[in-house]
């Protein structure tokens, strides 16, 4: 009975995704993430939050996210790229990391995001635009298990995606 009530409650509630980035300059990449979420009619809350420069802002964002039932947080950062890791350490909300290209072509960001110690997981995506888009699509795939309308849209998206691949190279 409790499971049925919870499922009914979930169906009535729309998922919310948190999208945070370490710098305003990351928006050029993360706009692709937000556009992807928007194309599936998924609500998101996007903010600029630096783990190093605005730690109190991060703490407040996490408290707000937990209070309003945010489903997943996508965190993008370049350089030291600790935003996703610090976020994951402060909440039980799943965190996805998007490394942003930086001084070392984003390899530094990728390693900083991917090399989390055991016990504090961060799902890490590709550097830059592909990672931003795929992080949104990953969230959409997760949510499609609980929200039938999202599942239908994802199936249609993937069918259309497959149709774009030519059968022959000539």
Image (cartoon, rainbow, N blue to C red):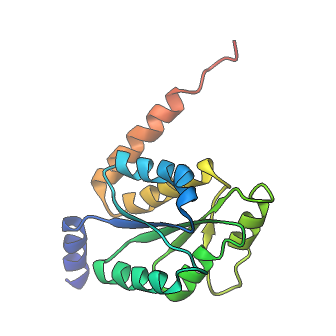
Vertical side of 5 occupied by 12: above or below? above
Q: Position of residue 59 (x, y in %)?
A: 46, 86
Left or right side of 154 for 30: right
Left or right side of 112 for 52: left
Residue positioned 22% across, 84% down in the render: 2
Left or right side of 52 for 105: right
Residue positioned 71% across, 84% down in the render: 117
Q: Nearer the viewer, residue 134 or 152?
A: 134
Residue 32 visible at all: yes
Q: Position of residue 42 (x, y in %)?
A: 33, 56
Q: Position of residue 129 (x, y in %)?
A: 60, 48
Vertical side of 36 occupied by 91: above or below? below
Tell me how many marks there are. Answer: 0
Q: Which residue is at the far top? A: 170
Q: Nearer the viewer, residue 27 or 64?
A: 27
Q: Position of residue 32 (x, y in %)?
A: 50, 48
Q: Quadrant of residue 87?
A: bottom right
Residue positioned 57% across, 57% down in the render: 25
Q: Quadrant of residue 169?
A: top right
Q: Which residue is at the far right? A: 104
Task: Name the image quarter holding the C terminus.
Answer: top right
Residue positioned 49% across, 75% down in the render: 94
Residue 92 visible at all: no
Q: Nearer the viewer, residue 18 or 153?
A: 18
Task: Name the image quarter holding the N terminus.
Answer: bottom left
Left or right side of 162 for 112: right
């Amino acid at each position: 009975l409790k499971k049925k009530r919870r499922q009914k409650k979930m169906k009535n509630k729309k998922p919310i995704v948190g999208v945070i980035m370490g710098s305003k300059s990351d928006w050029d990449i993360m706009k692709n993430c937000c556009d992807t979420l928007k194309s599936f009619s998924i609500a998101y809350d996007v903010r600029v939050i630096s783990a190093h420069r605005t730690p109190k802002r991060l703490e407040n964002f996490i408290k707000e996210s937990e209070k309003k039932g945010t489903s997943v947080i996508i965190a993008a950062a370049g350089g030291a790229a600790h935003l996703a890791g610090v976020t994951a350490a402060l909440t039980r909300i799943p965190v996805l990391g998007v490394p942003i290209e930086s001084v070392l072509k984003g390899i530094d960001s990728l390693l900083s995001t991917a090399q989390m110690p055991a016990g504090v997981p961060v799902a890490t995506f590709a550097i830059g635009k592909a990672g931003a888009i795929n992080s949104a699509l990953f969230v959409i795939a997760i949510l499609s298990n609980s929200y039938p309308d999202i599942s239908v849209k994802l199936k249609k998206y993937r069918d259309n995606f497959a149709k774009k691949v030519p059968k022959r190279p000539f």
